[in-house]
Amino acid sequence: MIRKFFLVLSVFLLVSCVYTEREDITALSRMGGEGKAVITIDVSAMKESGFSALLPENELFSRLDRVSLELAPTGAGYPLPLSDWNVTGTANGLLSSTEVGTLLIWNPDFIRAKDGPRHYVNKESGISAGVPEDGIVLFTTSDYSDAYSALLKDPVRMDEAIYTAMTDSLAAIYMDKPETLPPLGFDIPKETVAKIESILLLFGEGDGCFNLYGEIGMDTEGSARTLCTFLRNLLIQEVRRSGERLDVKALSNIFTYEESSVIISGYKLSYDNVSALLTKEN
C-alpha cells in the first residue's frame, strides 16, 4: 500500500544538492479527521533498520527523513481500493525550494499553477506539488491551496499522545472513526468496521521482523470482544498454515481487550508479509 504512494514522490528524483536539514514535522499533527487514514514513515530509522530494502532505491530517498500521508476516501465500498482515496502528504529532509522548483519548471510534465501558493501540477496525473519551505515537499491529488492551509496553517488536530507514539515508531497508521478501510490483506467483517471508533497501529523492529503494537477502539465492550476473537482466530489459522508449533496461550496474549479497546501486543510481521502488502496492486 505505502509503496504506491512512494511513487507519487518520484517526480523529485533529480534533487541533487545538499541543504540544511529541517526537523519540523508538525504537518503530521494537522493530518487526520473522521474517516481519514494517516500514515507516517520514519525514513531515517528505516534506512538503519533491517528493512531498508523496503524503501525505493533512488536519490530522493537518500535525502528524506520522513514521509507522512493523509488518505481521504472518495468513494463507497469496503474494502475501498486505493484508487478511491485522495492523497495529501509531506516529505521532510534535505530538500530545497529553489532546487525542486527549478526542476519542476523545466519538467514538461508539470505546469505552474496560476492561483494559490506557488506549486506545480502534473498534467497527466493531476498531482500537485510544491516546496513551501526548505526541507518540506507538499503534494496532493486534490486542491493544493486547501492542503497548504490544512497542513501548514491550521491548528493542530491530532492528540499529542498519538502524535508522539507515531513519531517514535518506524512506521505508524492512525484512523479516526473510519467509514471504510483500504485493502489490508485480510478482511475484517464490514459490520465490525462500522463499530470501530479509532485505530492506532505502531510498527517497530523485532528479531528479523516488524513488531506490531497498537490499539483499536470499539463502540462497546461486546464489539471489542468480537473483534479480538476474530483476530485471534486469524492468527491461529496463519500459524497452522505455516506449520509452526501452535501455542494458543501465547497467541491469545497478542490480541486482548480491555473494556471497549482491542490491544495488540507484539504481533510479528515478516519481511515477506510487509513486502507483499506494499507491492499489492488494487
Image (cartoon, rainbow, N blue to C red):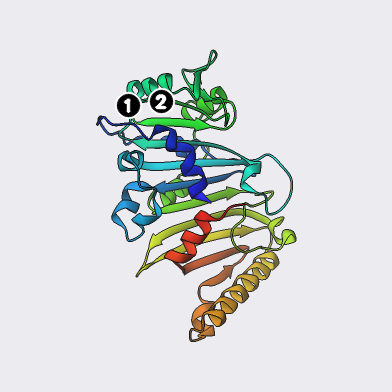
Task: Tell me the number on the disc at residue 229.
Answer: none
Residues packed near mark 2 inside 10 Å, few (<14), some (14 to 19) or many (20 plus): many
Q: Identify the residue shown where x is 60% and y is 78%.
A: 237
Give residue 274's position: percent from left, percent from top.
Answer: 47, 61
Task: Tell me which amino acid carries mark 2.
Answer: Val
Give residue 113's position: percent from left, percent from top.
Answer: 52, 17
Q: Which residue is mark 2?
A: 131
Q: Among all residues in the image, which is located at the extreme top?
A: 114
Quarter of the figure with residue 86 = top right
Q: Which residue is mark 1?
A: 96
Front in this rendered view, residue 132 or 16: 16
Q: Identify the residue shown where x is 39% and y is 50%.
A: 55
> In the rendered picture of this protein, how many numbered marks are placed on residues?
2
Task: Tell me which amino acid carries mark 1.
Answer: Ser
Q: Is the C-beta separation of discs 2 and 1 under 8 Å?
A: yes
Position of residue 213 relative to residue 91, above or below, is below
Residues packed near mark 1 inside 10 Å, few (<14), some (14 to 19) or many (20 plus): many
